[in-house]
Image (cartoon, rainbow, N blue to C red):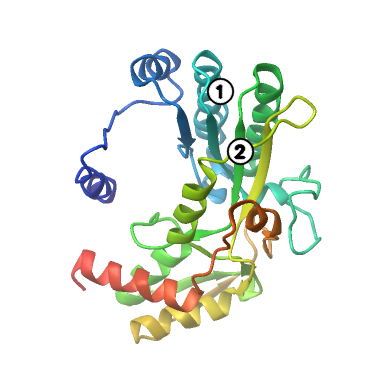
Amino acid sequence: MELKRDRLAQLETYPNFQFCLLDVADKPALLGLFVGGAFDQVIHLAAQAGVRYSIDNPDSYAQSNLIGFLNVLEACRAFVPRHLIYASSSSVYGLSTAMPYATTDKADRPVSFYAATKRANELMAHTYSHLYNIPITGLRFFTVYGPWGRPDMALFKFTDAILNGRPIDVYNDGDMSRDFTYIDDIVESLTRLLPLPPASENGTPNTVFNIGLGAPVKLLDFVDNIESALGISATRNYLPLQPGEVINTWADTRDLEARINFRPQVTVASGVRAFVDWYRAYYGV
């Protein structure tokens, strides 16, 4: 919670920023926000995140990711914005073995309940867009990382463990890869997409894009980058593949590039170093 409060303190330095504490699963509260907000553009990033947590806590995901997203759609039905952008996930590709993942590929075999909720969001968005003519864009984020990131993500956990002399858990014996995407590239993509609502296709102004670097990195190489940035070697605890995890991810971002004339470009080496610099400064280590 302290990290969240400190993130919020950073945002509150901007004069046009306003914070409202509410649960997206609380429909009356959310509709009340829209009544007073007169929003012409909406970026919906609120969700219960994480693959592993969803294995044992599916109810939390149903409330935040399904009921919460339904409430956002209902609010946008009542007060139609010029553009609604929401966060989906690369996890929707599930058991797909076609690489790189393209938005034209099937995404009907998720391997975690988290992934299932995100795929459900995409179907819900398509339906609301079609029925109520709401311009909607879904973004399949690929392993987002960077300063102020989530403590449950590998980069945060590995950095913390290495600095505190604890071993790191490396799943599937390290035989995995991820298309790591630096937070600045995510923000730049969102900024460019926001004024570009999708055109109506067959009566449905709805689309989905991948947002990833387009260059998967092996997990062991990722750990090497963390060690290099820290100047400390990790003690590695090799473990089997965890339920709900996929082995590889790789984003085909050509349609995104064509739409916004931009592609994510921050390398893992520079992105990891930026995170480590932030971590050391934030925690004073």
- Where residue 42 appears, x then y in whole percent? 47, 32
For the residue pair 126 and 81, the one nearer the viewer reads as: 81
The residue sitting at 37% across, 81% down in the picture is: 229
In the rendered image, the quadrant that contains the N terminus is: top left
Q: Position of residue 67 (x, y in %)?
A: 54, 24
* Other-residue count near label 2 (Cα within 10 Å), few / some / many at <14 / 14–19 / ≥20: many
Q: Nearer the viewer, residue 53 or 156?
A: 156
**Which amino acid type is shown beneath numbered disc 2?**
Thr
Q: Secondary structure at mark 1?
A: helix
Residue 73, disc: 1
Image position of 98 with respect to 24: above or below: below
Which label lies toward us, 2 or 1?
A: 2
At horizontal 45% and vertical 37% (from top left) the residue drawn is 46
Query: Is there any visible trace of residue 167 in the rendered image?
Result: no
Position in image of residue 284 (x %, y %)? 18, 70
Q: Residue at x 21, y 42 (%)?
A: 12
Measured in 3D between alpha carbons, the distance from the residue under mark 2 to the one under mark 1, in whole angstroms, is 12 Å
Q: Residue at x 45, y 27 (%)?
A: 40
Q: Position of residue 126 (x, y in %)?
A: 70, 29
Q: Which of the image's four quarters has the C terminus? A: bottom left
Q: Is residue 278 something one can see in this rendering?
A: yes
Mark 2 or mark 1, which has the lower sequence index? 1
Q: SS for tag 2?
A: strand
Q: Amino acid at mark 1?
A: Leu
Q: Report the residue marked by disc 2.
A: 137
Determine crowd level at label 1: few under 14, some 14-19, many 20+ residues with C-alpha closer than 10 A: many
Label at residue 6: none
62 relative to 180, above or below: above
Q: Nearer the viewer, residue 14 or 93?
A: 14
Q: Would residue 9 be found to the left or right of residue 55 on screen?
A: left
